[in-house]
Image (cartoon, helix red, strand yellow):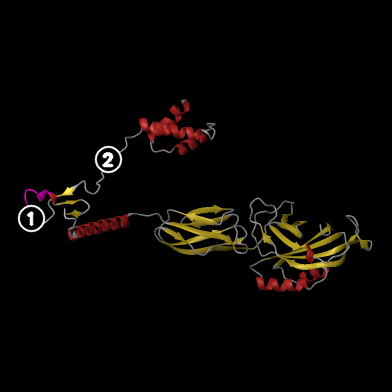
Amino acid sequence: DGIFEQAVVPLLVECPALRAVTIFEQLRRRDLKLPASVRRTLKRRVRRWRALHGPEQEVIFAQRNPPGRLALSDLLTVAPQDLTGDNHSNYYATVFELYVPEGKYVKTRGWILLSAAVVVVIAVFVAAYLSTVSFGTTLEFVVRDMHCGEWVYGTEIQLQNRTIRGFFATTYHFSQLDRGASILKIEAPYYEGVEVPINLKRGRNILDEPIELMGFEIPELSHFFIMERIEDGQLISEVRPVAANGQAILNHPCLDLRMFVRISAQILDGAYSYEPSDEGAERGEELYTAELTPVWDANPGTIFRWKTRLPVEEIKRSRALYWVVDYLLLIPDPREIGPTELDAIGNELASKTTVEAWMGYLDTLEEALSFYLFPSWNVVAGG
């Protein structure tokens, strides 16, 4: 009661229209330790205060005119000889229809014309009023990564000297804009910025096509860490970019990552390794070589942004107990190299039969392409 009288009542006296939720948030911002359960109690107290001390409410007495209760007695034209002292009061017109005792309806053309005229007048006044009302001008649009179609981290959007910053969102909204031609400017770290000319009309504006930003770099990339496991008959590999200080790089452009894998039997002293080996192990016969399809994980909480799946049944059977899984990752700069050139490079790599051949070929390429090799030893064959 003390808090309500000392803190809430002055706010209601100053502004009776304040909502209880707004008052509750204001009290919490004043460092009043109020539990969430107090909000419902506060709503009841505010409602009771308004009923006792709030501004007077407008009282309206609704009027209803059911058919037959009200009548108009002077809107009919009848012959004088038809009016007698016995029956002249039986001719009447209700508010809803004109009726005569014999059960016949009198034509109401005049009423219809009058009603139509009233409707037209009202429509003209409504149209004139709407033309003077200033409706809010809004803009809705989608911003996404060009390659994977997901969020763009660190998005900064500017329009009419106003700025929106986004991180894990794709849909954005501006309100209370000025009508006319404007430039929508969008930028994000390690993406190429864009400027979109738009023409805003009064009311709601929606851009039909999404705005796609092209990422060109993973910042501070030193190498990749890959963790694999066999689950439900598939070799699942999860990929994480890592900085030079060993920290995972989580929020970065998606990019057109190309990933190749070569699986070979792990041997030691000319025979299959029968236990994990930290030194002396070598690559034996090739069991599988192919290009994998990385899938981007847009979940903000993940620490592995890419994931690939390889059916184990596609890997050549052997007596090897352990595998060596070599991953080759290509990171292109889309400003320098396009998908067609990447496809050609992928076809060439697919024809190479050794890791050394991979590296020898890649060393001949220009700097528009970065590549990383991640060997994984002592992988249990077949899980």
- Residue 182 is left or right of residue 227, and the answer is left
Magenta stretch contains residue 167 = no
Q: Is disc 1 surrounded by few (<14), some (14 to 19) or many (20+) residues within 10 Å?
A: few
The quarter in which the C terminus is drawn is: bottom right
Q: Is disc 2 surrounded by few (<14), some (14 to 19) or many (20+) residues within 10 Å?
A: few
Which type of secondary structure does the marked residue at label 2 adopt? loop
Q: Which residue is at the front of the view, 213 or 43?
A: 43
- Does the CB distance between marks 1 and 2 fall below 8 Å? no
Reading the chain from its start, which is encountered first: label 1 or label 2? 2
Q: Between tags 1 and 2, which lies in front?
A: 1
The CA span between labels 1 and 2 is: 41 Å
Q: Is residue 329 above or below residue 69?
A: below
Q: Residue at x 40, y 31 (%)?
A: 48
- Residue 7 is left or right of residue 340, and the answer is left
Which type of secondary structure does the marked residue at label 1 adopt? helix
Image spot of residue 60 (x, y percent): 28, 40
Quarter of the image where one finds residue 217: bottom right
Amino acid type, callout 1: Asp
Predominant SS of the magenta segment: loop
- Any mark on residue 61, and which? 2
What residue sits right under mark 1 in the picture?
A: 82
Q: Which residue is at the front of the view, 94 or 301?
A: 94
Q: Which residues are magenta?
A: 83-89
- Residue 373 is left or right of residue 28, and the answer is right
